[in-house]
Amino acid sequence: MTLAEQMKTWRHDFHRAPELAFEVHNTAERVAGLLRSFGVDEVRTGIGRTGVVGVVRSGSSTKAIGLRADLDALPIQELGDVPYRSTIDGVFHGCGHDGHTAILLGVAKELCDHRSFDGTIYLVFQPNEENGLGATAMLDDGLLGRFPMSAIYGLHNKPGIPAGHFATRVGPMMSSEDLFEIVITGRGGHASMPERLIDPVVIAAEVIQSLQSIVSRSVSANDVAVVSITEMTTDGARNIVPSTVTLRGDCRTFSTEVQAVIERRMREIVSGICSAHGATGTVRYWNEFVPLVNTEREVNVAVAAAARVAGSANVEANCRLVTASEDFARYLQYVPGCFMDIGNGTEGHCGSSLHSPRYDFNDDILSPGAMFFLEVVRGELGAL
């Protein structure tokens, strides 16, 4: 069986048995077992609860780099009809982490079979990317102290880009994600007597409208920001004006400075409007994902590697900003690195949006993805 066929088999196996968040026990065990079977020098498990790190060494250089893949699936019911369909109701690999894991396993096998590089490679298999908690867990568990690396590289499939094409950029590439919860407390009562009440629904409507002015009036036109209300709940009923309204949502941007502006203005707006109506408002605001910021040297290494795989015409070295978030960004706060997108295709299930119930990872990009990582190794640690 060729390496491409093996990667496809692994990918389909992971797809059939998806696991969520930190509960990727079977997936991590399978990954660790495969790494050992390839002859990886060290296999460490339980890092960041369920993360796995494989260590491959060759030559005498002390230089080391990291390559990262993600293990977890999504709480979505799969609607696609494929022979390897998820066997777990309400859970499936709707973001392609099964493919990313298979790619890095293929890289591990190739590195062990052909140790013609000089240095150390840390193969990082991370849990709980989707909730933005896995990277922090691995870092808090001493990832960089136990596996010191001079750079780290990640790869993610991207529907809408032709299969096997690559895209990245220097500097900010993917946005932060901040979540918020606003609780507006008024005075509820009978819907027929609004004059005796402080209606938090009316106040909430005013708050929702005013929050949209943050981006248009408090953030520079040269910056990118998104403020979205995604949920509104009350304790009212058909003929009862509620006493409380809760608003929830998220914010996206590419800089910590803009994050601070959004939070400050949100608190000011809620406080001012609620005070004007005789109500009270509280704001809980917290960060889930930080902006993903690539470093120039590592982007140059990654772009050159991708060009050797796909040809320079099929590599976008200054792609558009993406207002989605990625947990890989946490590593880049401590280690130089580059996050690269690889096209998943433009049609059918492979062209469906990430997190769509009909999405599927494109098996045709397993080999180009593995070749990309191997070329990064070549660029950092010498010829394979």
Image (cartoon, rainbow, N blue to C red):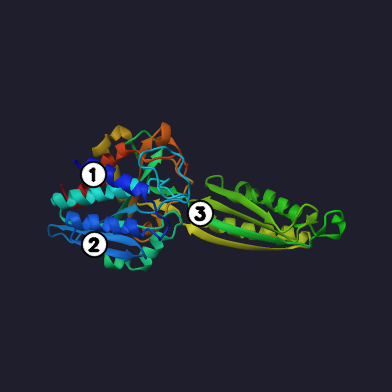
Identify the image quadrant of residue 6: top left
- Compared across the picture, whether 34 is left or right of 328 comes to left
Q: Position of residue 335 (x, y in %)?
A: 33, 59
Nearest-to-viewer mark from 1 and 3: 1
Query: How would you rate the neighbour count of disc 2 (Cα within 10 Å): few for under 14, some for 14-19, many for 20 or more?
Result: some
Quickly name the residue at label 1.
Answer: 6
Q: Position of residue 254 (x, y in %)?
A: 48, 51
Query: How would you rate the neighbour count of disc 3 (Cα within 10 Å): few for under 14, some for 14-19, many for 20 or more?
Result: many
Nearest-to-viewer mark from 1 and 2: 1
Identify the image quadrant of residue 22: bottom left
- Say which mark, if any, is on residue 43: 2
Please state which amino acid type lies under the numbered disc 3: Glu
First in sequence: mark 3 vs mark 2:
2
Between 92 and 324, the one lying in front of the other is 92
Nearest-to-viewer mark from 3 and 2: 2
- Compared across the picture, whether 188 is left or right of 78 comes to right
Residue at the location (55% across, 57% down)?
Answer: 179
Residue at the location (30% across, 42% down)?
Answer: 303
Please state which amino acid type lies under the numbered disc 1: Gln
First in sequence: mark 1 vs mark 3:
1
In the rendered image, the quadrant that contains the N terminus is: top left
Residue at the location (35% across, 57% down)?
Answer: 126
Quickly name the residue at label 3.
Answer: 177
Q: Position of residue 217 (x, y in %)?
A: 63, 48
Between 201 and 270, the one lying in front of the other is 201
